[in-house]
Image (cartoon, rainbow, N blue to C red):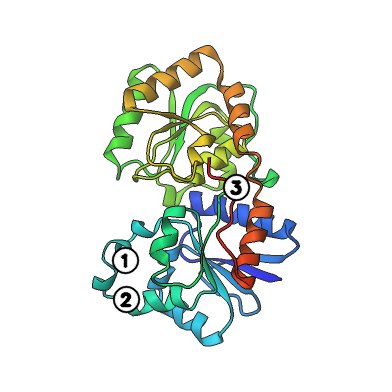
Amino acid sequence: MRIDICCIGNRFNMYRNLIALLYHSLVDAGHDVSVSQNRVATDAVSLVLPPMAFRVPELVDELAGRRRRYLVVGVETFDGFSHGRAPDAADDLDPFRRFFGEATAVLCLFRQDLQPYRAVTSRPLYLRYGVHPALDEIPDAADRPVDVAFFGDVDRYPARVRTIERLRQAGLTVDVLANATNAPHELVRNARLARAKVDLNLAHAEHASPQRVVYLANNRRCCVSNAVSDPDGYLQAAYPSPDETALIEACRSIVADGSWRARGEAAYERVRDWAMPGIVAAALDAAFDGGASVGGRVG
């Protein structure tokens, strides 16, 4: 099948990781795959992300006008944008319903999204975020002079600012690649991450997102995370701490005892069965032939 992964907006840190994961997995599944940014391929089934792309009226008109199949990738949670909270009050309700209603399927990274999406699409499907050998791309550096690394937006989230400052006050060296939407190329990002012993996941929402923790586990990295709701089991890829004080102590002790490499290997072992080629192949089968949610066991 000819498939185009269509990213509307910036292809920043998290979207880049997911796009690469989908690309390599779809190629392994035997598809002819391309990636487009802010344009729709005319000769392919489109996988469109993020869901907020419905706010681009030209995109909605283009997808509807050509009458070709497209799927939406639910890279963000349904309640992460205003329609999840008050869909009937939205000014752009018509393009919202049109965008999702005419999609062949919506592939949801979160099980909690299946029910709300049923109000606007006939086929919401669960797509577990998985792993792929091609995403094992962070160098395994022998020299790691940095204690803790974090990539993602910081200034807009006071809790992240506070945690990072407390880590530094505890005597740890912390490298922060802030401003995720204007992040450096992934080669630069990954070269800096390779210098760190421990990676940090600071969820800013009330749910666990896979796009940092599973990616890092794919790279056999030791990721310490704050604890949030995790019905999908994504935090199996990390080492969650119940509160900020415990998180700081976890980082300090792992750096001190040198267990970060063994912990990274253990994290990979916990997610290695989430092989993305099989997951995405099953998702497409369910989307085009009918079927239930896919993505494997929730642990």
Q: Residue at x 56, y 74 (%)?
A: 70
Q: Label 1 amino acid? A: His
Q: Label 2 amino acid? A: Leu
Q: How packed is label 1: few (under 14 Cα within 10 Å), some, or many (20 or more)? A: some
Numbered badge on residue 130: 3
255 left or right of 219 in image:
left
Percent coordinates x, y for residue 55 in the rendering:
38, 72
Quarter of the image holding residue 84? bottom left
Say if 176 sits above or below 298 in the image.
above
Q: Residue at x 74, y 56 (%)?
A: 28
Mark 1 → mark 2, Cα distance in angstroms? 8 Å
Of residue 158 and residue 54, the one placed in the foreground of this image is: 54
In which quadrant is the N terminus drawn?
bottom right
Of the image marks 1 and 2, the number of the one nearer the N terminus: 1
Can the viewer see residue 92 in this picture? yes
Q: Residue at x 49, y 18 (%)?
A: 254
Q: Label 3 amino acid? A: Gly
For label 2, the residue is 93
Is mark 1 in CB contact (under 8 Å) with mark 2?
Answer: yes
Per the image, label 3 sits on a secondary structure element best described as loop
Say if 250 sits above or below 194 in the image.
above
215 left or right of 251 in image:
right
Percent coordinates x, y for residue 78 in the rendering:
38, 59
For label 1, the residue is 83
Of residue 205 and residue 148, the one placed in the foreground of this image is: 205
Residue most extreme to the right:
30
